Image (cartoon, rainbow, N blue to C red):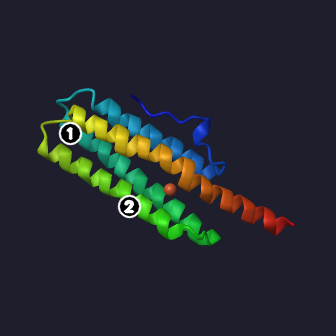
Amino acid sequence: MYAEFDDTLVTGNEMIDSQHRELIGKINDLLRSCEDHADRKGAVRMLNYLADYTEFHFKAEEQLQEEIGYPGIKEHKAKHEELRRTVSELHEMLEEQEGPTDDFVEMVNKNVTEWLYYHIKGFDRSVAEYKFIRNNEKMI
Ligand SMILES: [Fe+2]
């Protein structure tokens, strides 16, 4: 099951949306690499790419929240920590197992893809809305 960026994931903030598209692409690269259960090296490499991009994206999102004085930044940062923890658990799984197992793929689907969908629809959308309202207030 590949991840998909559809209209329900649009926040309206161009930077956030384009980074989410990229992130979903990286999740799919990882899932694709898992099709060969014996290819542990390939999965580790794709997981590293995903981890690096996640870090880049979270930093950008957190910086944006600081810039606009977003009141929910503390809770939002705590949520980002959840995904960071998942990524390190996934790393551990690959170290302990011969290659990317079905359990590994299930964890990617549930704790990365599903987590991201939920996070975007609630947490990220509310940042984009806050920024939008703040910008419009300035124009009045
Ligand atoms: Fe976020």
Q: Residue at x 30, y 36 (%)?
A: 106
Q: Amino acid at mark 1?
A: Lys
Question: How many discs mark residues in the rendered view?
Answer: 2
Q: Position of residue 31 (x, y in %)?
A: 34, 33
Q: Nearer the viewer, residue 86 or 118?
A: 118
Closer to the observer: label 1 or label 2? 2
Q: Residue at x 62, y 36 (%)?
A: 7
Q: Nearer the viewer, residue 120 or 60?
A: 120
Residue that badge 1 annotates: 41
Q: Position of residue 46 (x, y in %)?
A: 31, 41
Q: Quadrant of the C terminus?
A: bottom right
Horizontal side of residue 21 vs 79, given as left or right: right
Q: Amino acid at mark 2?
A: Glu
Q: Nearer the viewer, residue 53 or 116?
A: 116
Residue 37 vs 66, above or below: the answer is above
Q: Position of residue 8 (x, y in %)?
A: 60, 38
Q: Quadrant of residue 111?
A: top left
Residue that badge 2 annotates: 81
Q: Quadrant of the N terminus?
A: top left
Asked which secondary structure carries label 2, the reply is helix
Residue 45 vs 38, above or below: the answer is below
Question: Label 2 neighbourhood size at 10 Å, few (<14), some (14-19), many (20+)?
Answer: few
In three-dimensional space, the C-alpha distance between marks 1 and 2, rounded to whole angstroms, equals 25 Å
| Mark 1 in CB contact with mark 2 (< 8 angstroms) | no
Q: Position of residue 21 (x, y in %)?
A: 52, 41
Instruction: Respond yes or no on whether mark 1 lies under 8 Å from ligand 1.
Output: no
Horizontal side of residue 60 vs 50, given as left or right: right
Q: Residue at x 57, y 45 (%)?
A: 18
Horizontal side of residue 117 vs 93, given as left or right: right
Sequence-wise first label, 1 or 2: 1
Asked which secondary structure carries label 1, the reply is helix
